[in-house]
Image (cartoon, rainbow, N blue to C red):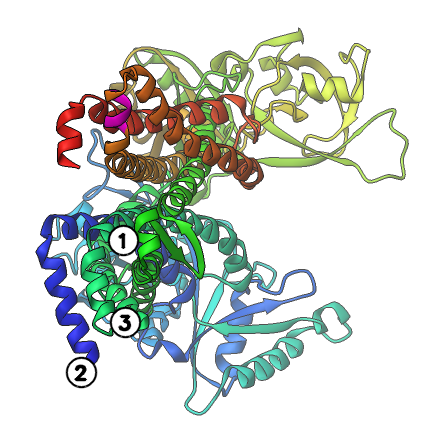
Amino acid sequence: MILFDDLRFAFRQVMRSPGFAVAIVLTLALCIGANTAIFSIFDAWVLRPIPARDAGQIINVYRSTGQDPYGVFSYPEYTSYRDHNTVLAGVAAFAGGQVTLAGKGAAASGGDAGETLQAQMVSGNYFSMLGIAAERGRMFLPDEDRTPNAHPVVILSHDLWQRRFGGDPNIAGTQVTLNSVQYTVVGIAPEAFGGTTPDAPDVWVPMMMAGNVRPGAHVLEDGNERSLQLVGRLAPGAGREQAHVQLSVLARNLAPAGDSAGRAVSVTVTPGQFLDPRERGDALPFAGLLMATVALVLLIACANIANVLLARSADRQREIAIRLSLGASRGRLVRQLLTETMVLALAGGVAGSILALWLAELIVGALHPPGGHRLSVDVQLDGRVLAYTILLSVITGIACGLAPALGSSRQDLASAVKDEWNAFGRRVTGSRLRSTLVVTQVAVSLFLLVGAGLLVRALQKAQDVTPGFNLSDVQVVSADLQLHDYDSAHAKAFQQALSTRLQALPGVKGVALARTEPLGSNFAATGFATQAQPGGGPPAIVNFNTVSPGYFDVLGIPIVRGRTFTDEDVASSARVAVVSEALAHRYWPGENPIGKRFNGGGTSPYREVIGVARDVRNVYLWTNTEPYIYTPLPAAGAPDMQFFVRTEGNPAPLMAAVPASVRAIDSRLQATTHRLANNLAIWIWPSQVGALLSGALGILALLLASAGIYAVAANAVTQRTREIAIRLALGARHAGVLALLLRDGMRMVAIGVVIGLVGAAGGSTLLSKFLYGLSAFDVLAFAGVSVLLAGVAFLACWIPARRVTRVDPAVALRYQ
């Protein structure tokens, strides 16, 4: 009954100042919403089970060895576990891959170039074991996953169905071309189902189609080809420990007799979740840092609201004094005042939980890497997220209202005369408590703004990085030769024919071939030892690339000494190489590297150095001093080469003509094209995300802090109106009074800046891995943020101070 009375009175008090209440609720909604949004993403990826019927019965199964407790399986291992266990009602396998979509539904950006899709090969029982039903059509049948390459059927993700096929309700039964093979669409996955990994696939195909998705990998036959992840459903009455014991016994039985290493293999069983324990451990620090950041923004908001409530409590001193004189206890008053704050906080929590859904989708959208696929995040306000939001709202209400409630409820005549408050059992003046809260706001804001400044500066530096080769004018063209069993000789003929056709296209300045892309996701490494190097020690590991003679000209990589490759070098299979400056300086310091011999570059016989190329950022964006080797194309040809086409002007019409040029040579082939500059975009994407999130939170923190400083400054000068009027009446100059008020206000800001700088200096080291070539103690970031915050704070203090100094002293004294 008492609680009901408190709530009723609290609502009445809130409705007496609706503008004030709306401002506080909106402030808390934004801050609580940001916290809830980050937690909901963390919940979806790390805490929540994978989407399935009776998800508590789903487990992840990992191949465990001494080196890797969370390994993957081969297909023969999977079938053994599937067929010989008694603790699982079902066990399914899945593995990732990529396919090229051609024809209907392919990229609509002009031309008929194929679109690369994220594919997932799954066992026939994958969907049925998880309990996932098709939104349209059906899921896979058991017969469709028994014979290799016999049933080319596909299930489309809801996203791909909408994005590329316009949500065609009659899509089931139609044909699509994936990796040059006609697949029959049998169903559409539900919108809420994004698979069992964070990287949601666009299509699912039966495991028996592995030969088409991963040509040459021998996924189904080779017991050493381990790429499958396993997910299972516990049998009725069985537990995870029973599954671990029985599957580990099966793992040891799979090892050949006498194989002690194989006998050491076991199985790790965990609850069915997107990430394995090691990945969750890696995600926790980043998630913790992000959640701590938004929590600090909420702390600023709490300090801001507490300051406002402290100022308002002065207007309620008469009401509170009357309540105390009528016999109300201090605890009763504190409870009532806290109830009023709690009503505002819970209202902010409700609004924040609604806002969180939109914010979470916005954040997930920003997390998509350039050219990447959607992430599987089903953000929802489940019980865990709602409990978090309620708890956060309650803590926020206490943090905002406890100090004002304690101060307001303890009054006597002396404290009323001296404008004193009592907080947490210690008597301090009201202005001192408010000043402490302002210092906290400034320090936390500076801490966040320095982090944002460092990430923005790092992003700027990354964007200004010169990789050392031509990015903007080079297009990369790939053809699916391996899918069509091209041998080296046929690949060589095709590459020569396509090079001639590409070179003849208008706007093409040069064509070259290479096995890997600079700053790409794939790279090749080899052991390296000079001819003069003494034997016995392990060889160094050096990255290398296989390139055609025109590669250096097309990418604009200067040869600083010696020469590049020639057609004669390729035709004669010459054992030559071009090395980077860094490699030459490391292994032949002070010597002429031309003519030196070494072992490496993917083969064992010695190679002779014929040229030295300028150092470029081949493998990592943050360094161009990694030793690197270039070797010439093999004379016999190689089917895994990519074309690098240097263009001038708008490359879009030229790239649109590439698929036709490929099919003119072989009508079965599909070609994909992309700009080499996309590789740089992927490298700087983490910095972009960090700069975006931290920048948004930093701006929010700055706005909240400036509003708090203004409120405190305005309240302080209002309380000193009589003093200021007397000073002016006695002849004080307006400029002197203004300087006095500004000095008092900026003293709090200066203390907060110093504390914030110390904290930022300690916290900036956590960001060092995201700062490409930038010091964690970058002077420009620290100084620039300090000046910005000080400038905003000065303006927040100056506006109310200037207003009060312009008041007529006679009017002010008469009012007082």
Q: Is residue 316 left or right of residue 414?
A: left
* Depth check, front residue: 276 or 38: 38
Provide the residue designation for mark 3.
132
Tell me the CA gap for discs 2 and 3. 49 Å
Report if residue 188 is visible in the image: no
Nearest to the observer: residue 265 or residue 259:
265
Q: Is residue 713 above or below residue 379?
A: above
Alpha carbons under labels 3 and 1: distance apart? 31 Å
Magenta residue span: 724-728
Secondary structure category for the residue under label 1: helix
Q: CA distance from mark 2 to mark 1?
A: 32 Å
Task: Quickly name the residue at label 1.
Answer: 33
Magenta part mainly helix, strand or loop? helix
Viewer-nearest of discs 2 and 3: 2
- Left/right placement of residue 235 relative to residue 551 reads left
Label 3: few (<14), some (14–19) or many (≥20) C-alpha neighbours in 10 Å = some
- Helix, strand, or loop for circle 2? loop
Q: Which of the labelled discs sits on residue 1, or is there none?
A: 2
Q: Quadrant of residue 532?
A: top right
Q: Quadrant of residue 675?
A: top left
Sort mark 2 into few (<14), some (14-19) or many (20+) by Cα contacts within 10 Å: few
The type of residue carrying mark 3 is: Ile
Q: Is residue 726 magenta?
A: yes
Image position, residue 350 (x, y; %): 20, 61
Quadrant in the picture for residue 171: bottom left
Residue 281 position (above or below residue 600): below
Circles 2 and 1 in contact, beta carbons < 8 Å: no
Decide whether residue 562 is among the magenta residues. Answer: no
Q: Is residue 115 above or below residue 631?
A: below
Q: Total label count? A: 3
